[in-house]
Image (cartoon, grey):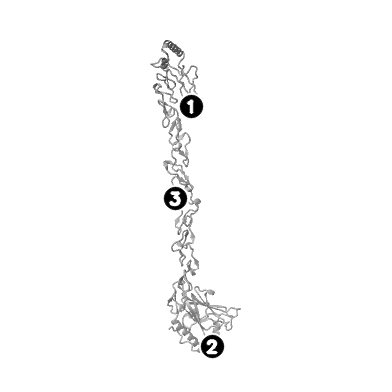
Amino acid sequence: MKIFPGFLSRYVSGTNMYHDCLFLLTGVVLAFGYDDLSKNKVATQSTTAVSSTDDFIASNAVDRDITTCMRASPIGKSSVDKTVWWRVDLGGVYNIYSANILFKNYVGYESRQRGRFAGFSLYISNNGSMDNSSLCYKDGPQLPSLNFTTTCITSGRYVTFYNERLDGVSYPEGYTLSLVYTELCEVIVQGCQASGVYGRSCAQPCPFNCRDNDCHIKEGTCFDCAPGWREAVCNTKCNAGWYGLNCKQQCSGHCRDNAICNHVTGQCDGGCAAGWRGVLCDKVCKDETYGNSCVYNCSGNCLHDYPCNRQTGQCDMGCKPGYINAFCNEHCPPGYYGYECKKACSGHCLNNTVCDHITGTCTNGCLAGYVGKLCNDACKEGYFGQNCLHACSSNCKTCKYTDGTCSCQAGWKGSNCSTVCIKSFGENCLYPCSKNCVNQTCNRFHGICQFGCESGYHGQKCDKEFLSTSCLSAVSSGFIGATVSACVIIAMVVLISMIRRKGVFISKPNSSNPKDATYAEIENQRSGDSTYQELSVTTGQELTGSQPDKAYQNLALQ
């Protein structure tokens, strides 16, 4: 049991002995109850009464010697000071159960001392403040006992005694109003020095989920619960969908698989539902991200750069040109391009490469014979090849725009119509000269025999036989003499006509085309087996060609 120094040598008068006995009983309670939190702690006061030996300092109230007391300068009507305070620093925040104050008594002056003590206030706080939130006890209107104890279950570091006598204020009967000295002999603050415990022996641990491990020092109930817990001893989780301090915060509702958020932190321990992000899953995905906790990137190919669906990643408004499927992450199939891949490529890209899936252009150029961004324009007439840079031959009737191969005009043959016809004539030299032409040589444009006909044939193409044999066979044997005579006369007439006329025949020009330009051909042919030249044109006939593209006119008199 704790016995305070000097107690037994204290006053023996009845009144003082009464108070001393009370204080002794208090000491006995302290010895077997709560901890003494204020003993020998640092104390301060607003003023100190004048003394030559510093007998009235603030620390006297916590030295556990009832014969030494603090004393402040007087307050009241005749005093300069109107208020007074004394404060002890417990050195830390403790759970407090009660405060006991022993006010000084004088033999025969107990009523006066109670009047000086009356009206005081007791504050307990963490910072020394004196306001309604830290008020532990307010005395009045009855006069207090000089050995005063009040239960004040709270926590704090600073315990402050305060009193006042203000001018113009009416105070209850019995209050001393002048020369009000404050004399505190002992201030005992009872509580538990250890944190997180309660009970008279300070041996019971506070419930695990009490906020700051702080509980009612007597009952063991929590003043506040740690986040996520509720009820008096904080042993019940927040209701589903709620979390945090006092379970007053609502979950976001966006946890993955509709899970309930953590009752303490509010976090979604299994991650966020599709389209949500953040610690609490309360923020939507940023643009171009989607899915659970927004960990996936959109394709970036949604139509008009709209963001994809934050939950599914699909492009709800469709795809940009060149892309297909719900996510717009696939190119058009080969050979197609554009919006919804509905346009077909030209099929004329160089090396048979596919066109660009977005624009349809051939990035490496076009096949021979085609031009334009899409390679869908054929070379204009007269040109062919890569980029249509090559001109077709002038001898072509038609020219293939891809490789320049020609269908030739009359008199020419070969892939580019650069080879003249030999023993043949016409377009692409398709027609052979008549075998009845001398040396089977004919005009390459229209097939007229150039050097005359073989014996027995006549005509421009030597395709007609002479009728001499037929004529002789037609004369009857009775008129052989007359027939022979007639034949001799006819032959003489023809011979005289040939001598008088020269075998020169001229053809007039009828075309400006060099290929079709007319020119004169002189033909004077002899035959070893024939003594004359037969002419196939009747005397006086106009000398003209039958076709505009024929270069020769074989003329004869008959």
- What residue type is disc 1 on? Asn
Q: Which residue is drawn at 42% across and 13% down?
A: 476
Query: Circle 1 is placed at which residue position?
Result: 513
Q: Is residue 45 above or below residue 324?
A: below
**Mark 1 vs 3: CB contact within 8 A:** no
The one nearer the camera, 244 or 71, is 244
Instruction: Please state the horizontal and vertical placement of residue 540, each as a whole percent of the image.
Output: 50, 17
Q: What's the CA distance linking mark 1 and mark 2?
A: 158 Å
The one nearer the camera, 458 or 314, is 458
Query: Circle 2 is placed at which residue position?
Result: 108
Mark 3 falls on what kind of element? strand
Q: Is residue 89 above or below residue 286?
A: below
- What residue type is disc 2 on? Gly
- What residue type is disc 3 on? Glu
Q: Is residue 81 visible?
A: no
Q: What's the CA distance linking mark 1 and mark 3?
A: 60 Å
Query: Circle 3 is placed at which residue position?
Result: 330
User: Pointer 3: residues within 10 angstroms few (<14), some, or many (20+)?
Assistant: some
Instruction: Please state the horizontal and vertical placement of residue 546, each as a whole percent of the image.
Output: 48, 23
Q: What's the CA distance linking mark 2 and mark 3?
A: 106 Å
